[in-house]
Image (cartoon, rainbow, N blue to C red):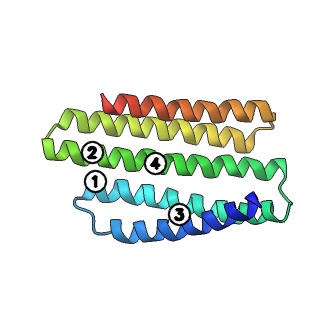
Amino acid sequence: LSAIFNSVSVHLFLIEAIGLAYRHSTSMNLMMRWLLYFGDMCFVVGSIMDIVLSYFWVFDRLSYELSKLFIAAACLWLACAITYTTATIYSDYILMKDAGKQAFVLIVTIAVIAIMALIATIVLTAPISLTATIALSSVISVAAIVSMILISL
């Protein structure tokens, strides 16, 4: 039953992602448009991946190899969340005209997304155990939390 609810929810998330992408296309300045575009694309692609994977889960055809794609989709969702948070903080600092903080926010965001991309690449390509996969997923979560703390300082 939970697989069916998951499948329904990821379909609804895709509808939300498309709606956000449409609404964000009229964002205020170029930097905000690019940040939101990146976040929207992560949201859309992550949703599509989750939709495809949900059918494997509903029909009980999920394998260990496919479960690695769940981690990749989660990385995209996390990149989306970090990017949206960064865009919000960035817009606040644009209004405050704090150029030093703008640069710091963008550098931290780019660094965290690069770390997530590296970890996702390792998880998807290396023949690693489930324990190592879970550990790398935990590193992604810790990187996200640390980045949010650094950005909010």
- Say whether disc 4 or disc 1 marks the residue closer to the N-terminus: 1
Q: Which residue is mark 1?
A: 31
Q: Residues within 10 Å of mark 2 (few under 14, many from 20)?
A: many
Q: Secondary structure at mark 4?
A: helix
Q: Secondary structure at mark 3?
A: helix
Q: Residues within 10 Å of mark 3 (few under 14, many from 20)?
A: many
Residue 45 falls left or right of residue 5: left
Question: How far is disc 3 from disc 1 in space, using C-alphas?
Answer: 20 Å
Q: Position of residue 110 (x, y in %)?
A: 42, 40
The mark closer to the camera, 4 or 1, is 4
- Say whether disc 4 or disc 3 marks the residue closer to the N-terminus: 3
Q: Which residue is mark 2?
A: 90
Q: Nearer the viewer, residue 104 or 142?
A: 142
Name which residue lies at 56% across and 68% down. Answer: 12
Q: Nearer the viewer, residue 80 or 4?
A: 4
Question: How far is disc 4 from disc 2 in space, using C-alphas?
Answer: 14 Å
Q: Residues within 10 Å of mark 1 (few under 14, many from 20)?
A: few
Name which residue lies at 25% across and 58% down. Answer: 30
Task: Answer with the quarter of the image where residue 29 lies.
Answer: bottom left
**Number of numbered callouts drawn:** 4
